[in-house]
Image (cartoon, rainbow, N blue to C red):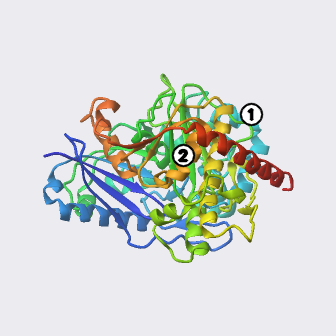
Amino acid sequence: MKYLLGFDIGSSSIKAALIHAESGEVRSIVSAPKKEMPIASSQPGFAEQDPAMWWKYVCDCSNQIIEKHPDASENIVSIGIAYQMHGLVVIDKNGKVLRPSIIWCDSRAVDTGEALLEELEPDYFLHSHYNYPGNFTFSKLRWIQNHQPELFDQIDKIMLPGDYIAFKMSGMARTSITGLSEGIMWNFEQNELDKNLFERCSMDPKMVPEYQPTFSTQGEVTSTAAKELGIEPGVPISYRSGDQPNNAWSLHVNEPGIMAGTGGTSGVLYGISEQPVIDRSQRTNSFAHVNYTPEKPRIGTLLCINGAGILYSWIRKNITGQEQEYAELENRAATISPGSEGVFMLPFGNGAERMLQNKPIGAHLAGLDLNRHHQDHLIRAGLEGIGFAFYYGYEIMKELGMSSHLLRVGNDNLFQSTIFSECFASLSGVTIEVREATGAVGAALGAGLGSGYYKTANEALSSQEIKKTIEPNKNLSNTYEEYYHTWKEALLNKLKTL
């Protein structure tokens, strides 16, 4: 019996999945640690994690799986890795990590990115990278160069979080085109690493590891790593991807015409195109998708809504004060009619919103009638407010030519809420297809394709189960259009004051 092993390197936890290669059946999904991994923040805006911590919990997850399925230790075909995007790991010539990783939610390099934009001109970045440098990985590297020059001089290789885990497994420093593009280091016009960018910043391009296709053997597990993981040496690592491209891959969103979505703490809409989608306002970002090649480009355009599930979580903890199960909150909200009888929420309370041009708008409650409204109204208003925010984001994607009749999502987030899902589907006219897919499972299936065990993406993803489908409701659409107009007007008025 042959297996595929997938890891998802998040900032909160590490997840792993064991897949029966022939059938695609999920045999085990585990996570570690039991509590969220800590994020160090020595100054406002700083967010760092020790890569050794990621490796420790990768090994913990692997050993948990082998303990449950001892026969898998000698029968793993390949390993795949998904990871938190936009992080930076730096190592010296001996492979030693020089400092904690500056992770995705660290905002220290915002000013650094703006300075790069002024120095090298906006059109250079838009034409070559499809994005401004912003707070992405290259800007974080530039920040180290400017603020920690002695440490910078010791850097031999730079890596994304998933690259580092693969390095720990194989001893080989490798990266991918999609990884370089998410770090604003891949030049799409020249179809190669942007060596000019490095040289103009007095950096050695050789600090970037060799890059290979996402679906390819990128090293093999060493005997040392195998002992720590509880598996046999020689297993190939044949897939790695940032979490959002991996989510789209996992949901079989790899060609134009279909969108992928997530609804966790933040929300994401992600679509595929053959040509670059360049948003000069930078409300969206475009990167090389997992199946990108210079000969057959596939660009993933990502719109992020920071204020999404975090609002629902806040309501659960601070409005109801009972921390009820989300299913119970859904039942309570269902007793209130659509539109929440006039009370509504702007959910943008999780930092600056990129789709609102990086304005820190904050969360807002409006239309509250103290004689009529109670907790259940606020629960529904929260779900509808997030639905309105998703639709606002969808309008941006549609404006950029990224509309779709179908949105595929996983079965472990906000889309489990009928109220939220029907709100978005009815406003957008988009059918929502909820699939049984997770990041670690997607990474494992990607490894199957990358190793050659599967010959096509269709074969790799053929066993994926559709859990439910939410169709647009015309009656709800008419109701929600009225309330969305009021919501959007409040949002735009608020934006004018910032």
Q: Secondary structure at mark 2?
A: helix
Residue type, label 1: Asp
Query: Where does label 2 land, which residue?
Result: 422
The one of 349 and 330 positioned closer to us in this rendering:
330
Q: Along the line of sight, which residue is nearer the eye, 14 or 314?
A: 314
Expressed as whole percent of the image width and height from the top left, the position of residue 179 reads: 50, 43
Residue 311 position (above or below residue 420): below
The crowding category of the residue bearing disc 1, from other C-alpha atoms within 10 Å (few below 14, some 14 to 19, many at least 20), is: some
Q: CA distance from mark 2 to mark 1?
A: 40 Å
**Residue 62 location, quadrant:** bottom left
Q: Is residue 155 visible?
A: yes
Answer whether residue 199 is visible to the viewer in this image: no
| Cβ–Cβ under 8 Å for marks 2 and 1 | no
Callout 2 amino acid: Glu
Identify the element where label 1 is drawn: helix
Residue 495 vertical position relative to residue 329 in the rendered view, above or below:
above
Report x, y in % for residue 294.
Answer: 50, 26
Q: List the residue tagged with mark 1.
A: 123
Q: Position of residue 491 (x, y in %)?
A: 77, 52
In the picture as drawn, the residue positioned furthest to the bottom comes out as: 321
Mark 2 vs 1, N-terminal side: 1
Question: Which quadrant is home to the C terminus?
Answer: bottom right
Compared with residue 481, is residue 17 higher up or lower down, i.e. above or below? Answer: below
* Residue 457: image tag: none
Residue 266 drawn at (x, y percent)? 57, 55
Q: Please state if 17 lies on the left or on the right of 46 as rendered.
A: left
- Residue drawn 21% across the image and 57% down it: 231
- Residue at 78% in and 44% down: 119
How would you rate the neighbour count of disc 2 (Cα within 10 Å): few for under 14, some for 14-19, many for 20 or more? many
